[in-house]
Image: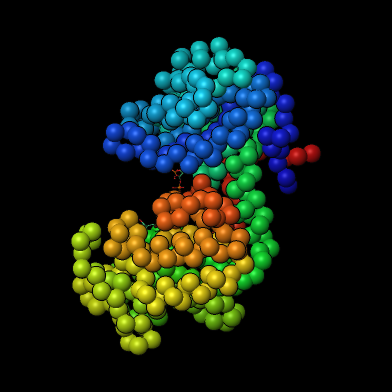
Amino acid sequence: MAKLTIRDIDVQGKEVLMRVDFNVPLDDNLQITDDSRILGALPSIKHLLAGGAKLVLCSHLGRPEGEAQEKYSLRPVAKRLSEHLGAAVAFADDTIGDHATTLRSTLHAGHVMVLENTRFDNRETANAPEFSKALAGNAEIFVNDAFGTAHRAHSSTEGVTHFVSQSVSGFLIEKELEFLQDKLASPEKPFVAIMGGAKVSDKIQVIKAMMAKADTFIIGGAMAYTFRLAQGYKVGDSLVEPKFVELAKEILEEAEAKGINFHLPADTRITQEFKPTAVTKVTAPYSDGGEIPDGWEGIDIGAVAIGDFEKVVAGAKTILWNGPMGVFELDNFAAGTKALTAAVAKSDALTIVGGGDSVTAANKFSDASNFSFLSTGGGASLELLEGKTLPGVAALTDKS
Ligand SMILES: Nc1ncnc2c1ncn2[C@@H]1O[C@H](COP(=O)(O)OP(=O)(O)O)[C@@H](O)[C@H]1O
Ligand SMILES: O=C(OP(=O)(O)O)[C@H](O)COP(=O)(O)O
């Protein structure tokens, strides 16, 4: 059932509570190192302010587990938002306390404020009704634009919808669903899914689910070693998740039975040390007997794999990329991710990138404008791709 969106509501003079995902990375000096998620929420914020809303923004930042801590405060985020808007942004020192209540009651139409971190109270993640009710306050309308947190059934994403008249999605959620759900429902073929990174346990189920849609898979990053282990090869000291070797075997068998192209890296860059000056070497291709010796760890794909993957990407009409090819944070381990980023960036296919580190790599080695869409959600995008319902979306008001 379609959900009401920000386009369907009149907000003039009304208090609107909007959940955003301002869970941005901060450095040790509490400086924001990537404000993609703030930029992602701007279209909805500007639209609501232009429509005359009294706009109250709420979000979590990090996992403070119910304890108010300076390092998880949203104050720097409110400041950055103010710079982007070129307008004042009021900041409440608490979430549902006296300061928040006073600021909310004196907020004028066309003005915006930010509440302190919702996770400074454990009732947020417990989805406690009394916390949801207090968060809703006098707001008639709730807008959810926090795609990155839409897979959580918390007070500020789900509970609050029970205490307002209407709950609608914002432009960011709308766009995320358009790319990750609608456009991938019947993708133009060949549809190449590139899966890498380190979170095998999170992503291997996604590979399984996507076998119904993608006709080609490229597997890189640490993910590849669990598959190589499943094929009976030695992977030395590389990162593997032994619990998933059986599932990896099943996936390889299913791919063969269904004629799905499943590309694992032919060769691997390996090291004995995890540091910028580490000596590295590349194994011979597996097909020539190359394996990863004990005491060595795979940290990137090799040159043969890069060439293979570039060819596959060049022939694609739809590409979904989630997870880097290697430990790209270190320059001497980054060649595979760099080459793959360039290949995806120059493709004419529909190119969708999901996952925090993959988006970082796309921005580091290319430019966001070279991709059709960079998702702001890691876990949320994976759950969507797995075919799961996102509680933060399911709770919104149905279109009649
Ligand atoms: N071969 C490898 N061995 C260990 N870590 C790896 C390897 N390849 C990639 N990684 C790491 O995987 C991390 C990203 O994985 P993940 O969180 O799954 O991706 P994303 O954030 O894009 O979803 C990066 O920090 C990268 O250094
Ligand atoms: O950054 C987030 O998730 P992500 O790293 O999976 O994209 C979201 O803000 C959700 O945070 P959470 O995983 O602490 O609930």
Q: Position of residue 62 (x, y in %)?
A: 39, 38
Question: Residue at position x 55%, y 11% from top?
Answer: 106
Comparing 359 with 348, the one in front is 348
Specify the color scheme. rainbow
Is residue 40 visible from the viewing direction of this image?
A: yes
Question: Residue at position x 45%, y 65% from top?
Answer: 340
Question: Residue at position x 49%, y 65% from top?
Answer: 343
Relative placement, left or right, of 302 versus 261 is: left
- Quadrant containing ligand 2 reads top left
Comparing 20 with 334, the one in front is 334
Is residue 63 visible from the viewing direction of this image?
A: no
Q: Is residue 254 above or below residue 135?
A: below
Relative placement, left or right, of 211 versus 33 is: right
Q: Position of residue 44 (x, y in %)?
A: 61, 34
Q: Is residue 199 above or below residue 316?
A: above
Q: Is residue 96 above or below residue 5?
A: above
Comparing 199 with 123, the one in front is 199
Q: Residue furthest bottom?
A: 288
Comparing 15 with 120, the one in front is 15
Q: Position of residue 97 (x, y in %)?
A: 46, 18
Q: Position of residue 277 (x, y in %)?
A: 20, 61
The quadrant in which residue 384 appears is bottom right
Q: How many marks?
A: 0
The quadrant in which residue 52 appears is top right
Indicate the quadrant containing the C terminus: top left, top right, bottom left or bottom right. top right
Question: Residue at position x 51%, y 75% from top?
Answer: 311
